Image (cartoon, rainbow, N blue to C red):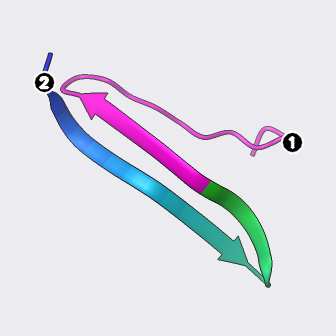
Amino acid sequence: MAERYTAENLTFTRSGRPRTDNVSLSLSQGELATLIGPHGA
């Protein structure tokens, strides 16, 4: 299947603290993905 959505090298910082660093993701049509933290949130 061809990739439909691609995100590369994402970094997210909140309150001066990094939450994610250099995250990349590719999804094909019909796929679903979630990012779950250490406390399930």
Identify the element where label 2 is drawn. loop
Seen at 84% across and 40% down, the residue is 38
The residue shown at (79%, 84%) is 16
Magenta residues (range): 22-41
Q: Alpha carbon of mark 1 to alpha carbon of mark 2: how far?
A: 33 Å
Residue 34 placement, left or right of 27: right
Q: Is residue 30 above or below residue 11?
A: above
Task: Name the image quarter holding residue 13.
Answer: bottom right
Q: Nearer the viewer, residue 20 or 30?
A: 20
* Amino acid at dot 1: His
- State the residue position of label 2: 2
Q: Is residue 6 left or right of residue 8?
A: left
Question: What amino acid is at disc 2?
Answer: Ala
**Residue occupying the point 19% across, 31% down:** 3
Tell me the residue that label 1 is attached to.
Answer: 39
Q: Secondary structure at mark 1?
A: loop
Rendering quarter of residue 27: top left
The crowd level at tag 1 (other Cα within 10 Å; few <14, some 14-19, many 20+) is few
